[in-house]
Image (tube, rainbow, N blue to C red):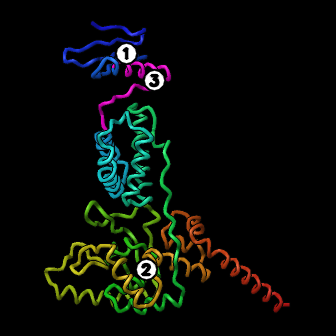
């Protein structure tokens, strides 16, 4: 027979042996909780009463993290670009679901999330990836809070691993010439000429199609990038409007691309039907397919640095080299920002603040030239 507990609700033992605690809700409805013992049912009843008194929603305990995130990914699919949605899905199913997927959504705690982040970092996941995971989980729980599925967003109560700081390395003008002299002997020599002269990202270089390049008018258009999707690489549209940009090519870059195109025509003829013409990539692998990015940076780039007797660096440092050389030469930071595809010029000035003192010196020299001209006129 149901028993009332201090006007907090009713508790009864069900025919199936479980205990049911039922509480009246402010909206006139009711909510039932189930437990194996009367004590556990009473605890749930009292917790529900405290939540009602505090103005918190009474949440459903059955839905797990995995179930909610699977449904949530379907919900936000139209709000995200395809590449972003793929990345969200990868992070959810590779790192979140295997670790905390069975945890009831309503019972997720800050401690459990903090343990997840720590475990992932210790297992070798980069802090930047954990930061992305945090963004995804925070957004998902924010939506869950809005829907009344959780009482709080527990990701707001955890510490996120700090972003790794990579020391920027750049090549001097002399080192660039030394580097490119060796790169010319490589199948992808033109790629490195473009990397140094345009500052394109690795994925952007590998995502170039011949239709994106106008050699007669000396420019190229960045429209897409090679990105990882699960266990394969695909061509995906660039993330932002700033990333989609037109870049003027140097005479050296045009010459390198013309020579590269002729060599590629020979490769196609030799391979015949074995060559994949699906994309018409500028820098494909030996069969015309999408090149694995790590092969360019870990194999070819490292080999060129060794041959040129230059210090080892990340492929991304060629992008830094391009920007630094242009700024040192006095090129307007706005122009450099546009070539790099930065969202704002402030990003460029912040990343390359080490070049600012030299730019100040150039400005002072320019004013000296103005004063000299005035003295001549007198």
- For the question of whether residue 73 can be seen, the reply is yes
Q: Are marks 3 and 2 in contact (CB under 8 Å)?
A: no
Q: Of discs 3 and 2, which sits in the foreground?
A: 3
Q: Is residue 125 left or right of residue 371?
A: left
Q: Label 2's element? A: helix
Q: How far apart are the alpha carbons under marks 1 and 2?
A: 66 Å
Residue beneath disc 2: 195
Q: Nearer the viewer, residue 289 or 223?
A: 289
Residue bounds of the magenta highlight: 41-64
Q: Label 3's element? A: helix
Instruction: Please tell me which residue is depicted at 42% across the width and 26% down the height of the picture.
Output: 57
Of the residues under marks 1 and 2, which one precedes in the sequence? 1
- Residue extending furthest left? 273
Which image quadrant for residue 233? bottom left
Labelled disc at residue 51: 3
Q: Position of residue 155 (x, y in %)?
A: 46, 43
Instruction: Please tell me which residue is depicted at 29% across the width and 12% down the height of the picture.
Output: 12
Labelled disc at residue 23: 1
Q: Position of residue 121 (x, y in %)?
A: 41, 57
Q: How far apart are the alpha carbons under marks 1 and 3?
A: 12 Å
Q: Nearer the viewer, residue 5 or 234?
A: 5
- For the question of whether residue 255 can be seen, the reply is no
Q: Is residue 121 left or right of residue 272?
A: right
Seen in the picture, residue 201 relative to 38 is either above or below; the reply is below
Q: Position of residue 149 (x, y in %)?
A: 38, 32
Q: Residues within 10 Å of mark 3 (few under 14, many from 20)?
A: some
Of the residues under marks 3 and 2, which one precedes in the sequence? 3
Rendered-image quadrant of the C terminus? bottom right
Q: Label 1's element? A: strand
Instruction: Please tell me which residue is depicted at 26% across the width and 13% down the height of the picture.
Output: 13
């Amino acid at each position: 027979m149901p028993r009332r507990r201090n006007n907090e609700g009713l508790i009864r033992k069900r025919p199936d042996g479980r205990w049911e605690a039922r509480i009246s809700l402010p909206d006139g409805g009711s909510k039932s909780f189930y437990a194996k013992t009367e004590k556990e049912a009473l605890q749930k009843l009292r917790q529900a009463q405290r939540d009602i008194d505090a103005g918190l929603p009474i949440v459903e305990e059955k839905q797990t993290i995995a179930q909610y995130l699977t449904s949530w990914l379907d919900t936000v699919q139209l709000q995200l670009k395809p590449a972003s949605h793929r990345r969200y899905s990868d992070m959810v199913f590779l790192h979140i679901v295997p670790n905390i997927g069975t945890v009831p959504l309503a019972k997720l705690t800050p401690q459990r999330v903090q343990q997840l982040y720590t475990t992932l970092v210790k297992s070798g996941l980069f802090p930047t990836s954990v930061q992305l995971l945090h963004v995804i989980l925070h957004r998902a729980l924010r939506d869950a809070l809005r829907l009344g599925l959780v009482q709080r967003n527990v990701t707001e109560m955890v510490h996120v691993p700090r972003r790794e700081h990579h020391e920027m390395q750049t090549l001097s003008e002399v080192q660039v010439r030394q580097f490119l002299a060796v790169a010319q002997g490589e199948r992808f020599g033109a790629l490195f000429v473009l990397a140094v002269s345009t500052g394109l990202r690795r994925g952007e270089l590998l995502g170039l199609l011949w239709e994106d390049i106008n050699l007669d008018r000396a420019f190229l258009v960045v429209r897409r990038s090679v990105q990882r999707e699960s266990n394969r690489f695909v061509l995906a549209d660039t993330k932002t409007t700033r990333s989609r940009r037109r870049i003027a090519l140097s005479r050296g870059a045009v010459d390198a691309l013309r020579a590269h195109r002729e060599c590629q025509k020979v490769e196609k003829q030799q391979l015949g039907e074995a060559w994949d013409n699906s994309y018409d990539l500028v820098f494909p692998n030996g069969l015309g397919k999408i090149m694995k990015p790590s092969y360019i940076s870990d194999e070819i780039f490292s080999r060129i640095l060794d041959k040129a007797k230059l210090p080892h660096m990340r492929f991304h440092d060629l992008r830094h080299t391009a920007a630094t050389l242009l700024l040192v030469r006095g090129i307007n930071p706005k122009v450099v920002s546009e070539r790099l595809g930065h969202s704002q010029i402030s990003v460029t000035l912040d990343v390359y603040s080490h070049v600012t003192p030299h730019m100040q010196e150039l400005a002072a020299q320019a004013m000296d030239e103005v004063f000299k001209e005035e003295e001549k006129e007198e």
